[in-house]
Structures are given as structure tokens and as C-alpha cells.
Image (cartoon, grey):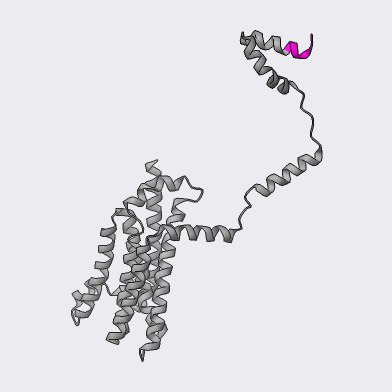
Amino acid sequence: MPEDESLFEKLKADLGDEAEASALLPMVRKLARPIEASPAGSNQALVELLRRELPRRQRRWQMHRALLNSQMRVIQRELWLASFMLMAIGVALTITQANSLVFAMIAPFIAAGGVAFLYNETDAAIEELENSLPTSSTLLLVTRLMLLFAFDLALALVGSLVLAVVLPGVSLLPLIEAWFAPMTFLTSVAFCLSIVLLDTFAALMFSLTLWAVHLLLRTRADGNVWLWVASLPGLNASETRPLLLLAAVALLASALLYRAERERYAK
């Protein structure tokens, strides 16, 4: 029996319909043909073609740049604009008052206020989506914090440089020392509270109130020990600045550990 007739009979027996068997016979004939081994050259050509089409592995610095660019777009544009405008207002007020302490008081307000808005209930709600990404959600959050703090830090440095040039008697390094440690500490306080409380307003108000009370009581504590203690003099004392920086690191680490534990229990 010819091969085609044998295939046709088998199809007709399986399908029970001669017309359907006739329609499928050409396809079955092709499938029944033995596969010819392709030459080695064609296999190599196929491998080269696939290699060109596959995405190339990015270098480490390219991956870091892509991460920074992606998180810059996540941060609300209003935060960038508000930080710039408030810092410019702070520089203008300092020049008007001809007192560099004004800028040292304003810079921590601006940085802490912006960071308080980095994490809230909305961000917590999309953690599940971020956890599905190849990059950890904790790294994404830290990247956003680093970007915004670096932006505020750059603005404060530029503002300090302008004041050192414009105002007579203002030295650049002492001015930077006056605001850097308090700004770093208050930023960490705002960030930690926003993680723990999931409340942007509460984190903002606590950190700003802490600094405002310090500034207010410090000016009225002349000879009054209780007011001096209540003003938390360590927030701006030169000898406690290293401790403020260490406390800022500890608060940041605590906030991230707390968030990781909360995420683990939520699973």
C-alpha cells in the first residue's frame, strides 16, 4: 500500500470522516517526513542571530544610572520645585537680615519637610507591586531618599556659597557646619516617622516642631537652666554634631529594619 494511502486510511479511521481526512492529509504528510539534520554552519548562524537580538548585559554603572533615573521620575515634581523655591527664599531672607544664622535655621526645615513626603500610605499600598520588580523595594526607597536629600544638600551648599560671597564676614565652612548636622538629623527623624506612622503630616509636624521649639527656647533661655535644657541645645551645639550624624544613621537604619519586618509579617 502506498505511503499516502496508508496515512489516509489511518486518518479516516481516526476521524471517521473521509472529507476531513482528505483535508488533513497534506499536513500529516509533512509532519511524517523525517527531519533532516541542519548543517553546522546554519546552527552557528542561528546562534549569532539570537545573540545579536538578545539584550546586552548592562554594566554596573549603567544599572545604577538607570535606577537613579527611574526614581527621579517617581519623586513628585512639586518636591523638587518647593525645595528650590524655599531655599531661594531662605537665601533672600538671610541677605535681607544680613545674618547667616537665618539660613542655618531655615535649611533644616526645608530638607526635613521634603523628605517627610517621600513615604506615606500610598507608597505602602504599592509595596506589593515594587516587590515584584527585580530591584528590592527597600533599595528603591533608599534611592529616592538619597536623591532628594542630595538635591537639598546641593541647594544648601550653593546657598551657603552665595551668602559667603555676598555677606561680609560670613565664612563658608562655619556656615555649612551650622546647618549640616541639624539638617541631616531632622531629615532622618522625618523619614523614620513617615515609615513608622504612615502619616506624612505627623512626620512633618513633629520634625518641624522639634526644630522650631529648639530655636524659640534657645533665644529665651538666657540664664534659665530649665529653658536651656528644654531647648535641646544638642541639636545645634558644635560638640554634639558628630552624635547628631550618628543618630541620623541609626534612625535611618531603624526605619528600614522596621519596614522590612512589617513587610515580612504582611506576607
How many circles with numbers are drawn on the protein? 0
Quarter of the image with the N terminus is: top right
Res 35 → quadrant: top right
| Residue at figure coordinates x 65%, y 47% from the top left | 53
Residue 247 appearing in the image: no
Res 186 → quadrant: bottom left
Q: Main secondary structure of the magenta part?
A: helix
Q: Which residues are magenta?
A: 1-6
> Closest to the observer: 51 or 213?
51
Left or right: 265 in relation to 12: left
| Residue at figure coordinates x 63%, y 12% from the top left | 19
| Residue at figure coordinates x 40%, y 67% from the top left | 149
Q: At which x and y percent is residue 13?
A: 65, 8
> Closest to the observer: 2 or 82?
2
Q: At which x and y percent is residue 90?
A: 31, 77
Quarter of the image with the C terminus is: top left
Q: At which x and y percent is residue 102?
A: 29, 80
Q: At which x and y percent is residue 78?
A: 35, 64
Name above or below for residue 109 compared with residue 141.
below
Name above or below for residue 58 compared with residue 109.
above
| Residue at figure coordinates x 47%, y 57% from the top left | 70
> Closest to the observer: 148 or 189?
148
Examine the structure image and report whether residue 50 is included in the region drawn in magenta. no
Name above or below for residue 157 compared with residue 48.
below
Name above or below for residue 9 compared with residue 132.
above
> Closest to the observer: 58 or 220?
58
Residue 87 appearing in the image: yes
Examine the structure image and report whether residue 2 is included in the region drawn in magenta. yes
Residue found farthest to the bottom = 168
